[in-house]
Amino acid sequence: MSHPTLIEVAVPTPLRKNFSYLCPLNFSLPVIGARVTVPFAGRELVGLVTAHLDSVDVKLDKLKSLINILDNHALQPPTMRKMLSWASNYYLYSLGEIYQQAMPALLRKGHQAKLIEQLQWSLTEQGRNIEADSLARAKKQQQLVALLSDHGTRNNSQLKAADISTATIKAVAEKGLIEQLARSLPEPCFWNDDNINHDDALVLNSEQAICVAAINTEFGFNTSLLLGITGSGKTEVYLQAIEQVISAGKQALILVPEIGLTPQTLQRFQSRFNVPIVFLHSGLNDKERLDGWLKAKMGLAAIVIGTRSAIFTPLLKPGMIIVDEEHDSSFKQQDTFRYNARDLAVVRASLECIPLVLGSATPCFETLHNAQSGKYQLLNLTKRAGNASEASHQIIDIKGVKLQSGMSPQLIELMRHHLTRGDQVMLFLNRRGYAPTLLCHECGWLGDCQRCDAHYTVHQRYQYIQCHHCGAQEAIPRQCPCCGSTQLVTAGVGTEQLEETVNQLFPTFNSVRIDRDSTRNKGALDKSLTGITNNDYQVLIGTQMLAKGHHFPDVTLVAILDVDGALFSGDFRANEKLAQLYLQVSGRAGRASKPGQVVLQTHHPEHQLLRSLNREGYLAFSENALIERKVAQLPPYWHMALLRIESHDNRHINDFNQQLVEISHQLLQQLSSKETPLRQIGPMPAPMERRAGRFRWQVIFESSTRGQLHKFLAMLMPLLLKNKSSRQVRWSVDVDPIDMV
C-alpha cells in the first residue's frame, strides 16, 4: 500500500491554522515534527510537519507541494510538541510562529540540526617534550603550549577566549608542536554519582535538609514553591536536589531571570558537578546557541542554565526543572508571542512527569495562592544560611531635607561609617542615565520625545539625550529650542549623576556603576562583578541588574534611594512589585558573617506598605494584599486578558474600537452569567498613549473562570480578524498580562 502524500504543516504566519501540502512521490514521507520548506504567499518558509493526512476538503490540484525535507527525525520530542500546542491554545497564538520561537535562529533559517564534531588542538610528542625556555622569546607561543599542557585539548573558540591568535596557533603548528584532532562525541547521559564533587557541598541546616528531601525526583511530577528569605541558601538546596538527577544519569534545566545572574550561577554549578553544562542566553551568537540547544537535545549536556527562552530547550532525559527568582517579570515575554516561562515550566514538568521547583524570597501572588491552596507543595526557609544574621532596617524621612544627588546627609554619614570599617556599600536607584529630564530654567521648556509621551533622559557622559521607550536620541541642545536661552538644567537623578557625586564625596574609595549603559560591551558585567568580589570597588551603584541574586559578602549597607513613584502607581500590581524589589535589594546586605543594614529613603515613611514590610515581612504583606485582590476581583482570583491596539492614526483606532464594542458586547451577553461573569473595561487609552510614533489603546477582559475567558477570546478573535477595520491597526491579545503600560 502506498504511503499517503498529504501532510499538514505549521507555517510561521499570524494565521491560527495549519496548512495542507502535497508530498511528492519521489520524496520519503517526512516524520511528524520534522522541518520542511514550503511555498507560502510567494515565499519559501520553514515549517514543521504536524500530521499525515488521508484526505483534505479541497481539490488536490489546488494544493502546493513541499519543496524540501530538512530533518530525518523529529526536531522536538512529543512532550515538547504537546507543550507548544498547549501554548498555542492558551496564549491564542499561531502554532507555526510558536514553533519558530522555540527554535534557535539557525534552525529557523533551514540550517542542519546536526552537531558538527569540533577539531581540538593537542600537543604532539615533540610538543610534550619541548623545553619551556626554547620559546622564551615567543611569549604567546609559550602560553599556548603551557595551556595545552595543563588542559590536554582546546578548540579554536577556547583558544580565542584565552587571547591566543590564529597566527600564534599557525606558527606553533608549523613547528610541529601541536596537531589538530577530531574529538568524537561522548555517549548521551554518561554521568553518574562519580561526577559529583561531594566535598564541595555545604552542610545543610534542618530546614534545608527537609526541603531537599521533599524535592524527591522519584515521585514524578510535583511543583514545589521554595519560599526562602534572601540569603537562606536556596542555591545549595537546588544543588543537592540536582545531585539526585545527575546520579540517575538525567538532565536538569535551570531558568534564571537575568543574563547577569548566569555567570555567578554557572560557577557554583561547575565547582559542584564535573559534567557538561550548557549556558543559554541572548548574549550568545547563533552558532553558540544552536550548539548548546543540540547538546541538550542529544543528551550531551547534563545541566542547562538559561534565561526565559531556555524553557524551549529539548532534553533527552529530563529529570528536573528549577525556576530561580520565579516572581521576576523578565520571565514574561512582552512582545510577539507573550508567554510566561514560569507557567510553561509547570506545563512542561507535568508533561515530562518530573519535579518542578519554583524558588523565591518574594513569590508572585499567583504562585503564593497556588501554594496556600495546596496546588503546590510549600517549602519554607526562614533562617539565613551559615553565620549570616537578619539585616536591620531603617526608614529615613527626607521631607524638607537637602539632598545631594538623591542622598540625604544621614545616608552619607552612614556610608562613611561603613566604608571606613572596610566594608562595601550598595546604592540602588532604578533609573539609568544622568537625569530623567532636561528643562529650560527661563521658560520651562521640557525635553520631550517627539514620538512618545515621555521625557528624554540626559546622558551627560556621552552628551546626548535619549528616550528610553523608543530609543530615539540626539545631542544635548546648547540652547532652548523654545526661547533660545542657554540656561538648560537637569531635573531628577540617575545612576550616572549619582556615581559622579559619590566620587566627589568619597574620593579615596572606588565606585562601580552597573546598569544597561555601563555593561553594554561584552564581558563588562563579568569584569565588574569580579572586581566587586575581589573588593576592588567599595561603593556599588546600580539598577535592578545589581539587585537580583548576587552574593557580595562584604556589602553591609544597602540604600534604596527612590521608590516613592511606585507607592502611588495606577497599576494594580505596583505594590506587589515594589515589595518584591524592596526585599530583593535588601537581601544583598549582610549575607556573610558581617551584620547588614538596609536604609530606605522616602517622603512617605507613614505609608502602610512600607510599614508593613518593615515590621511584618513579605508574607504578612501578601496576606493583606491578597484579601484586597479578592475583594476587587483581580488576579489570582479572577483571570485577565489585555487587548492592545496600536496605529499611527487615531481615526483607525476609533473605527476598530467601534466594531470591537459591537462584537464584544454581543458575545458578553451570550456568554456571561451570574455563575460565570465576564466583564470588559475599555476601550481606553493606554497609560502611555503614544509610544514610538504610535497611538496606543487597550481593552481589559476579565472573568471569574479561566475557561470562560478563553471561550470568549476564542470566539472574539476570528470575528475581529474578519472585520475590515482590524487591518488598519496593529492589535494583539496578551493572556495573563504583567505589564499594563
Image: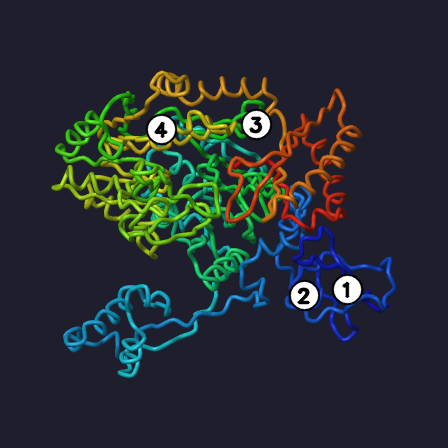
The image quarter in which residue 44 lies: bottom right
Q: Residue at x 67, y 61 (%)?
A: 47
Query: Which mark is first along the chain, 3 or 4?
Result: 4
Q: Is residue 142 left or right of residue 113?
A: left
Q: Amino acid at mark 4?
A: Asn
Residue position marked by numbered label 2 in the rendering? 36
Mark 3 lies on a secondary structure that is helix
Of residues 725 and 166, the one nearer the viewer is 725
Q: Is residue 339 left or right of residue 471?
A: right
Mark 4 lies on a secondary structure that is loop
Query: Which mark is first along the chain, 1 or 2?
Result: 1
Residue position marked by numbered label 1 in the rendering? 21
Q: Residue at x 47, y 34 (%)?
A: 327
- Marks 1/3: CA–CA distance: 44 Å
Query: Which mark is first along the chain, 3 or 2?
Result: 2
Of residues 85 and 637, the one nearer the viewer is 637
Query: Which mark is first along the chain, 1 or 4?
Result: 1
Total numbered badges shown on the rendered structure: 4
Instruction: Please name which of the two marks, 1 or 3, marks the residue nearer to the observer.
Output: 1
User: In the rendered structure, are the residues bearing label 2 and label 1 in contact, judged by CB atoms less than 8 Å apart?
Assistant: yes
User: In the rendered structure, are the residues bearing label 2 and label 3 in contact, judged by CB atoms less than 8 Å apart?
Assistant: no
Query: Which mark is first along the chain, 3 or 1?
Result: 1
- Marks 2/1: CA–CA distance: 11 Å
Mark 2 lies on a secondary structure that is strand
- Marks 2/3: CA–CA distance: 41 Å
Mark on residue 205?
4
Disc 4 residue crowd, few under 14, some 14–19, many 20+, Cα 10 Å: some
Residue position marked by numbered label 3 in the rendering? 370
